[in-house]
Image: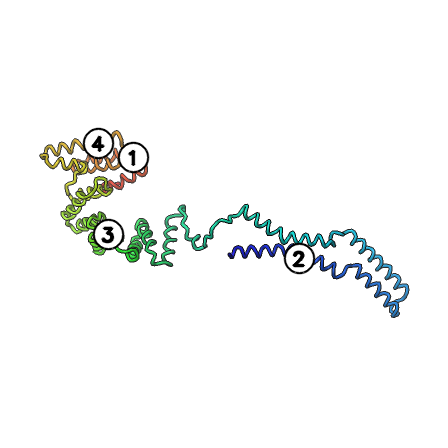
Amino acid sequence: MTLWFVFALMTVAAIFAVLWPLSRGTASRAGGSEAVVYKDQLAEVDRDVAAGQIGAAEAEAARVEISRRLLAAADNARDLPAQSNPGLRRSSAVLALVGLPIAAVAFYLALGSPQLGDFPLAARTRAADANQPLENLVAQVEAHLEKNPTDGRGWNVLAPVLARLGRYDDAVRAFRNSIAYNGDSAERRSDLGEALVGSGGGVVTGDAKAEFERAVALNADDPKANYFLGLAAEQDGRTADAATIWRDMLAKAPSDAPWRPLLQAALVRVGGPAPPALSNDAVAAAKDMNEADRGAMIRGMVDRLATRLKQNGDDVEGWLRLVRAYMVMGERDKAMSAVLDARQGVANDADRLRQLNEGLKNLGLDG
């Protein structure tokens, strides 16, 4: 509405600018011309002669000069008939009053955006640009939450981003606010516990452990909470308890669970049995074998995996399983050789190389 009011004022100003000189020209001609002035001067000369203020010779000279000017003014008026034409002035006024608004509207409809909806300034400033750096987007969300501290959805979005940026203390506060305004859940409690672990430099503190226990109370199978409870047991020196927790998780986990390699590496770290080269079906079949047959079966599967990876070296998970298997069997030299082969196999793919290095770090190897 304000925009249209401004447009109306601009239109009035434009019309006024056109009509002003026309009105001035009309007023000047209606109020008196040069001819009228010179006729008044001739009458004034006659009055001065009658009053005896000037002589006859001076009066005659003045009449001649004034008459000359009067004739010149009359000639000029005949040369400019259009300027004194009232019809032309009326046509110009009508054109200005009607034509200018019509032309402006036609121009706007052709080149403007009359159907574009209103977009308030506040919403414009909050609109996120995907090309901005992540820190700028985070700052915009934080500014929004300062004005709207009860926006649970905003805290839910901001908290994990702060954790990924390494701002763990801010992430802890954001996760607490998310729980306060979105409600309690096992996922939010385990995320809060993970942020507390990050804030503690990787140590599962008492506060973090309490959050993981709350998460397990809400969902006994929450993978993140159970993993960190096992890590807390390992950090407390209770490696047997840690191995038990992680083995139970593996037993319940689906075969394609993305966190299975992390658990298997953790079991290797605490000395627990973990035949990572075997599938769940193979493990079930191996239970009825004697030790020699079981060992031969595992060796055969590891050798077949190594052969396949030499032919297709871009399988990161396959390389990690092979390295893990060699470590479980105590063949560290073969494990390190497999690491070199794996890096050569994925050297041309930055994402796979990064994934490989992260997996090797989880195995306790230098990524």
Kindly identify which residue carries mark 3.
186
Choose between 233 and 141: the one closer to the eye.
Answer: 141
Mark earlier in primary sequence (4, 3): 3
Three-letter amino acid code of the residue under disc 3: Ala
State the image coordinates of residue 93 (x, y, percent, origin top left): 66, 54
Left/right placement of residue 184 relative to residue 282 reads right
Q: CA distance from mark 2 to mark 1?
A: 81 Å
For disc 4, the marked residue is: 306
Mark 4 and mark 1 in contact (Cβ < 8 Å)?
Answer: no
Q: Marks 4 and 2: which is nearer the front? A: 2
State the image quarter where residue 329 is shown: top left
Residue 325 makes an appearance in the image = no
Q: Amino acid at mark 4?
A: Ala
Please tell me whether mark 3 sits on a helix, a strand or a loop: helix
Q: Nearer the viewer, mark 4 or mark 3?
A: 3
| Residue 219, image x, y percentages | 21, 51
